[in-house]
């Protein structure tokens, strides 16, 4: 069985963060592992409190994983401080497939990362990434200009590749007013992945889940294009068949999509 590691924050209601990642790994038949960066008090209505993990405990978690079960693929989510990233960079520069979900702002609008951490993420972690998976607001933060249409998306994708040197980047189109089209920039070409827009408020954890599925598929040795294609179908079904839980933006159904194992 292949293995995947998530390095991210928690969600006690199970919709996002490492909880969503582990569900996604399990659904894709990959053995999931998790290192906690932050304990986050959140639910479908938003983020209430955040407690970042002590740096010694963080590094001990990572050492325990890599001393025993070296993952076939890694993803990072919420990395709230530069000091946390300085530890993590030592573990993601080993040539293992690495997916960055550049979590910066919660869907509730709560800021999850400091300014110095944003700079460190772009300049010191992106270059080790197999794939970076920003949504449009995150991509705007990375490139420092507004993204309103396809032309802006293409300019942003090209700028991220040129300035920060990840192997590839996918800018997710869920915030577009049209149907959500994702743009994958890879090997000097742009591939698009589209699906019909689903009318629902229950989209909590979509970014975590999407990037986790890609990570699981890379762990199994799938090509990046295949991994993204599966993740797009997975996330569409997960939203469409969401369990309608919670009083706010509810979680997804991580077990709705069964094909292409």
Image (cartoon, rainbow, N blue to C red):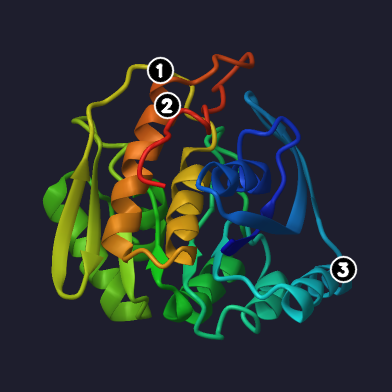
Residue at the spot x=49%, y=56% of the render? 216
Asked whether 132 or 155 is in front, the reply is 132
CA–CA distance in space, label 2 to label 1: 8 Å
Residue at the spot x=77%, y=76% of the render? 68
Residue at the spot x=41%, y=68% of the render? 221
Question: Which element carries disc 2, helix, strand or loop?
Answer: helix
Q: Nearer the viewer's eye, disc 3 or disc 2?
A: 2
Of the two numbered discs 2 and 1 on the same chain, state the one appearing first in sequence.
1
Give percent across and percent down for residue 194: 20, 39
Where is 145 relative to 178, above or below?
Answer: below
Where is 27 relative to 224, above or below?
Answer: above
Give percent across and percent down for residue 109: 55, 37
CA–CA distance in space, label 3 to label 2: 35 Å
Indicate the quadrant containing the N terminus: top left, top right, bottom left or bottom right.
bottom right
Residue 57, numbered circle: 3
Of the two numbered discs 3 and 2 on the same chain, state the one appearing first in sequence.
3
Tell me, yes or no, whether the two marked residues, 3 and 2, touch with CB atoms within 8 Å: no
Give percent across and percent down for residue 70: 66, 75
**Where is mark 1, residue-wise?**
200
Instruction: Determine crowd level at label 2: few under 14, some 14-19, many 20+ residues with C-alpha closer than 10 A.
Output: many
Question: Which element carries disc 3, helix, strand or loop?
Answer: helix
Question: Which element carries disc 1, helix, strand or loop?
Answer: loop
Tell me, yes or no, whether the two marked residues, 2 and 1, touch with CB atoms within 8 Å: yes
Side of 17 where 109 appears, left or right: left
Give the farthest residue toward the front.
1
**Where is mark 2, residue-wise?**
239
């Amino acid at each position: 069985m292949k293995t995947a590691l998530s390095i991210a924050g928690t969600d006690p209601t199970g919709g996002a963060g490492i909880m969503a990642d582990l569900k996604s790994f399990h659904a894709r038949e990959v053995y999931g592992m998790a290192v906690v960066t932050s304990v986050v008090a959140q639910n479908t209505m938003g983020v209430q409190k955040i407690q970042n993990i002590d740096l010694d405990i963080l590094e001990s978690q990572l050492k325990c994983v890599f001393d025993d079960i070296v993952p076939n693929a890694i993803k990072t989510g919420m990395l709230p401080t530069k000091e946390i990233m300085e530890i993590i960079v030592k573990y993601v520069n080993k040539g293992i497939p690495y997916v960055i979900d550049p979590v910066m702002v919660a869907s509730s609008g709560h800021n999850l990362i400091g300014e110095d951490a944003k700079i460190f993420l772009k300049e010191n972690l992106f270059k080790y990434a197999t794939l970076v998976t920003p949504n449009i607001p995150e991509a705007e933060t990375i490139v420092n200009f507004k993204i309103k249409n396809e032309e802006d998306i293409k300019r942003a994708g090209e700028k991220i590749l040129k300035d920060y040197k990840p192997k590839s980047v996918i800018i997710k189109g869920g915030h577009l007013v049209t149907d959500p089209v994702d743009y994958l920039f890879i090997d000097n070409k742009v591939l698009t992945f589209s699906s019909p827009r689903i009318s629902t408020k229950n989209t909590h954890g979509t970014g975590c889940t999407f990037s986790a599925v890609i990570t699981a598929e890379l762990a199994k040795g799938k090509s990046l294009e295949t991994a993204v294609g599966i993740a797009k179908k997975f996330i569409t079904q997960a939203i469409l068949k969401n369990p309608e839980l919670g009083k706010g933006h509810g979680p997804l159904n991580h077990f709705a999509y069964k094909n292409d194992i």
